[in-house]
Amino acid sequence: MPLYDMIVVGGGPAGMTAALYALRNGKTVLVIEKEGFGGQITHSPKVENYPGTLSMSGTEFADRLFDQIIAQGADFEIETVCAVESIGMRRVVRTEEGSTYESRAVVIATGVKHRMLGLEGEEDLVGEGISFCAVCDGDFYTGKTVCVAGGGNSALQEAILLAEKCSRVIMVQDLPVFTGESRLQDVLFAKENVSSFTNMKITALLTENGSFRGIETEERTTGEKQMIVCDGLFVAIGLIPENEQFRDVADLNEYGYFDSDEQCLTKTPGIFVAGDCRRKSVRQLTTAAADGACAALAACRFINENIK
C-alpha cells in the first residue's frame, strides 16, 4: 500500500480542485469518492456563472475536472470513508468497505446534501424542473412561474432573487408561519408578483410526459388539496452536512459544519477541510473551487515543512 502525500475525501469541485493543486505541486494524491465524481453540481443542466466559461452543464464541468486530475496522475477509489485518524506523522483513512489508506495530509471535502421533500419521482426531476439554487438556475425561469418550498431565511432569500426574474413566485410553507427574519419577509412580500401559502404540505409532483408541470398540496389542518401549476420548484428546506464521523479530528459547529474559516485548517495538524462542508456564507461552484485551492496549498506547506 503506497504512502500518498495527500488523500482527498470527496470528489466534488472542492475535492478535485484540491487534488489538482496538490498534483501541480508535485504531490502524490488519492481521491476517495463514495458515489460519483462532481457532487451537487452534476444536477445543474446549465452552469453560466463560472468565470471564463459561457455555458456548460454541471456534468461537463465535473467530467473535465476529473479528466484533468487523472491526466495529472491522481489515483481514485469509489468507497465510503468512515474515519480519518492522525497517528504520528501519518494520516490514516478508513472506509466502510474495509480498506485502509495512509498519507501525509488529508483534505476533507465531503460537501452537503440538499434536504429533499421525499416525494415520488423527485430525484428524477432534479435539474429538470426541480432546483435548489436561484443564483445558479434562476435565469432559466425568467418570465415564468415558480414555487419555492420552505419558509426560513434560505427560502426567503431564494425567493427574493427569483422575484426579480420570474413573472410569479409562489411560496409554499408547511408550517403555520414563515420562520425567516421579518426583515426578509418584509422585502419579499412587498413584491407584487409574490404570493404565499402557509400550513401547506407538498404531497406530489405533477408531470406530463415525464416533464415537470406543478405540485399538489394539502392544507395540514383541513386536508383540502390543491393543484398549483408552475414551471419550476425551488426546494429550500435545508442542507445536510455529513461530517459527524470526522468530529475527532475537526471541530463541528452547532449545525454540523466544520468550524473552519477560509484558511481551511482544523484542530488536527495535517488535516484540512474544503467546500460546502465547512461553515461559510456563500456556497457556490467558485467558492468550492477556491476552498480546494486554499486547502491544497496549506496541505502542501504542511508537508514541505514537516515531512523530511
Image (spheres, rainbow, N blue to C red):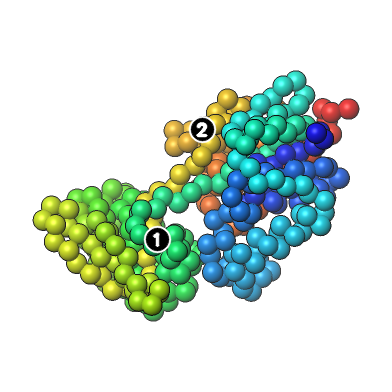
Q: Determine whether, in the image, residue 22 is placed left or right of residue 185.
A: right
Location of residue 5 in the rendering, given as x and y in whole percent from the top left corner? 80, 37
Location of residue 25 in the rendering, given as x and y in whole percent from the top left corner? 84, 46
Identity of the residue drawn at 29% across and 67% down: 215
Location of residue 263 in the rendering, given as x and y in whole percent from the top left corner? 65, 39
Q: Are marks 1 and 2 in contact (CB under 8 Å)?
A: no
Q: Is residue 21 above or below residue 167?
A: above
Separation of marks 1 and 2 at Cα, in angstroms: 27 Å
Q: Which numbered disc covers residue 244?
A: 2
Q: Residues within 10 Å of mark 1 (few under 14, many from 20)?
A: some
Q: Quadrant of the N terminus?
A: top right
Kindly give the residue lying farthest to the top in the view shown. 88
Viewer-proximal residue, 177 or 242? Answer: 242
Q: Which numbered disc covers residue 122?
A: 1
Q: What amino acid type should be assigned to the residue bearing mark 1? A: Glu
Which of discs 1 and 2 lies nearer the camera? The answer is: 1
> Which of disc 2 and disc 1 is earlier in sequence?
1
Identity of the residue drawn at 66% across and 36% down: 272
Q: Is residue 180 above or below residue 134?
A: above
Q: What amino acid type should be assigned to the residue bearing mark 2? A: Glu
Identity of the residue drawn at 38% across and 77% down: 209
Identity of the residue drawn at 55% across and 43% down: 277
